[in-house]
């Protein structure tokens, strides 16, 4: 199974489907698109049973501390200012779809389990694993602060001008996976609360 990313800007109202062409806006995205195509070529040439999945922003316990969710947790607990990436006007925060690592696993397990999916229908194909919810970074930070019962201090910054190719928003169309009968077993709010409380109880995993 190869994971890649194919996403559109949420602001344009379009969700990318699995067969939409890649339009990589930065080298990081291009390497993931290239890896997906390389894996697909092994299926096409040698019959390797490959399924490609495109997923949105993943959260979860034990995530690297420089990622957004654990970074916010650490700063909120320490009473520090949280940097929120926004557009050049510093009015509209970046927006993402989010899902827990458990739900990514559940989607992949569903696709590779012949009891759930006919292998002939999924092997050699691509499937989007969209976010359970779409939130801007400020909304997510506010949810984290509320779970911790701490105030949120934040600053909106124009991060995108200093990081070329960094999109303000992403969206994936998840209708194909849903059409196969897949449903996420755990809601995002429950997953976020579990994640936040785990990091609170394991401060050694945080940068504070």
Image (cartoon, rainbow, N blue to C red):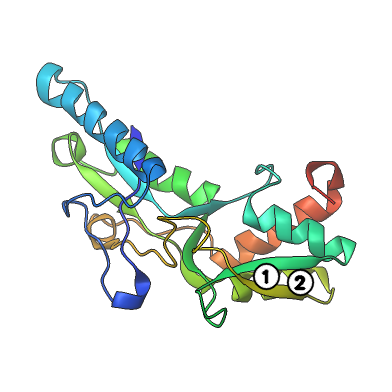
Outermost residue, right side:
78
Callout 2–callout 1 Cβ contact below 8 Å: yes
Badge 2: residue crowd in 10 Å (few <14, some 14–19, many ≥20): many
Going 80% across and 61% down the picture, which residue do you hit? 75
| Alpha carbon distance from label 2 to label 1 | 6 Å
User: Closest to the observer: 193 or 182?
Assistant: 193
State left or right for residue 162 relative to residue 182.
Answer: right
Name of the residue lying farthest toward the front: 162
Q: What residue lies at 25% left-to-right and 61% top-to-bottom?
A: 16
Measured as percent of width and height from the top left, residue 111 is found at: 31, 42
Q: Quadrant of the N terminus?
A: top left
Is residue 208 shown above or below 179? above
Question: In this figure, which residue is indicated by the disc labeled 1?
Answer: 141
Which of these two is toward me, 153 or 109? 153
Asked if residue 115 can be seen in this view, the reply is no
Q: Residue at x 19, y 34 (%)?
A: 123
Total marks shown come to: 2
Helix, strand or loop at mark 1: helix
Question: Residue 73: horizontal and vertical position, in percent?
Answer: 76, 59
Instruction: Say which quarter of the image contains residue 83.
Output: bottom right
Label 2: which residue? Answer: 145
Instruction: Say if residue 32 shows up in the picture.
Output: yes
Query: Could you say which disc has been placed on residue 17 in the image?
Result: none
Q: Position of residue 98 (x, y in %)?
A: 50, 61
């Amino acid at each position: 199974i190869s994971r890649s990313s194919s996403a559109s800007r949420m602001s344009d109202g379009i969700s990318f489907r699995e067969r939409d062409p890649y339009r990589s806006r930065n080298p990081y995205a291009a390497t993931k698109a290239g890896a997906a195509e390389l894996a697909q070529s092994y299926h096409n040439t040698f019959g390797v049973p490959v399924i490609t999945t495109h997923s949105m922003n993943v959260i979860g316990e034990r995530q690297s501390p420089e990622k957004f969710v654990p970074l916010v947790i650490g700063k909120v607990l320490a009473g520090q200012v949280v940097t929120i990436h926004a557009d050049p006007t510093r009015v509209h925060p970046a927006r993402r779809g989010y899902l827990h690592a458990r739900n990514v696993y559940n989607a992949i397990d569903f696709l590779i389990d012949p009891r759930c999916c006919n292998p002939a229908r999924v092997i050699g194909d691509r499937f989007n694993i969209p976010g359970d919810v779409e939130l801007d970074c400020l909304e997510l930070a506010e949810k984290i602060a509320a779970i911790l019962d701490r105030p949120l201090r934040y600053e909106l910054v124009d991060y995108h001008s200093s990081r070329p190719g960094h999109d303000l928003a992403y969206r994936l169309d998840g209708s194909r996976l849903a059409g196969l009968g897949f449903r996420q077993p755990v809601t995002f709010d429950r997953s976020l609360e579990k994640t936040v409380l785990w990091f609170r109880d394991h401060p050694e995993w945080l940068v504070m």
